[in-house]
Amino acid sequence: MRERLHFLLLNIGHFLDHLFTLIFATVAALALYREWGLGYADLLRYATPGFFAFGLFALPAGWLADKWSREGMMATFFIGIGLASIATSFARTPLQIGLALFVIGVFAAIYHPVGLAIVVEKWKNTGMRIAVNGVWGNLGVASAALITGYFIDHGGWRIAFLAPGVASIVVGVLYTALTWREITTPRANIAMKATARDTPAQMKALLLRVSTIVFLTTAVSSIVFQSTTFALPKVFDERLSGISVSPTALGGLAFLVFALGSMGQLVVGHCLDRLGPRTVFIAAAAAQVVFFAIMPGLVDWAALACAMAFMLAAFGQIPINDYMIGRLAEGEWRARIYGVRYVVSFTVLAAALPLIAFVYENWGFDALFRILAGSAAIILGAVLMLPQRLPRAEPVPA
């Protein structure tokens, strides 16, 4: 029972992590540009530092987790990001909200290197566990538009930051109580030195090849993920006028698309443990190329159906790199390796915001979808170079 509750709270953490980082996307698209008289592209600039923090602070978060306590860092995540979100609700100027979003990004950076390391280390059936955890994260992405749209209609955008902040602090208190023994017990002094085994040159070359592919696809897929999740509320605002007009309804449609997309992770998780990452990755990347390429020009129901298809493929791809890192990385370095992975991922993710703003101002969303089709083609080309079976790191003895 305790283990089930622990896993549930970790999943809720993933939900909240993505919820907090995308509240502003809907607030900017549906409320602030009217209230503050700023263009959508101008508002995106104030979110950029927060997304850089989301990436850059992942590595120190993973290092602290390995040195101090993974459970302690998770408790810090819940309570810290809750307080930061509450503070954001009091912002009165674009500069204030930019600073508050930066602090949210600092705390949000904790989850992926720490939470995923706990999931991979504590439980079996790694592919499915990562997939289930990923579904919760994607439901956070989906719910950001739904919840924020609701609060904009029923109380204003400030409540969209305030209410989840309070909820996160409550969860943090519960998590701290559940894991207090682990938090107050220092991590064992585990040997981090490499063993005396001699890795064959062929295996070293294979590990280097797979690692390069992992980090390349991580970087490029971050452009796809950020562009779709951040811009989709605005895309729907422009293209679904024949279906829906209110913020709540648009948020509901975005939720529907993101929620359906998250279900792709369960299929991927099931297939990873049986087919291996290469086959699954090829299918996900190829589907993205096709549906991003046909999205330009579509409106209303056709646009909605196409968005569902490319989000199913884009979200389904997410657990694959985490699965491969879990296979390649030695256990006691895992949080740090995940930290490096998310530094790459979220730094590129932050850099995608100016890209979205620039492309949108100059050419509109059709050009953005063509860029995403090209990005997916790069991912597909890289994945075709993966071996059929991954090498696996041997555990380092204590």
Image: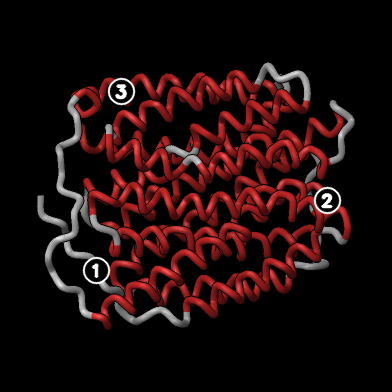
| 1 and 2 marks in contact (CB < 8 Å) | no
Kind of residue indicated by mark 1: Arg
Kind of residue indicated by mark 2: Glu
x, y percentage for residue 385? 45, 82
- Residue position for label 2: 238
- Residue position for label 1: 392
| 1 and 3 marks in contact (CB < 8 Å) | no
Kind of residue indicated by mark 3: Thr
For mark 1, give the secondary structure: loop
Q: Work out how far the residue at label 1 is from the one at label 2, CA to CA, in angstroms.
A: 47 Å
- Residue position for label 3: 176
Q: Splitting the image into 4 quarters, where does residue 205 fall?
A: bottom left
- Upstream in the sequence, badge 1 or badge 2? 2
x, y percentage for residue 55? 53, 45
187 w.r.t. 138: above or below: above
Front label number (1 vs 2):
1
Residue nearest the observer in this picture, 336 or 150? 336
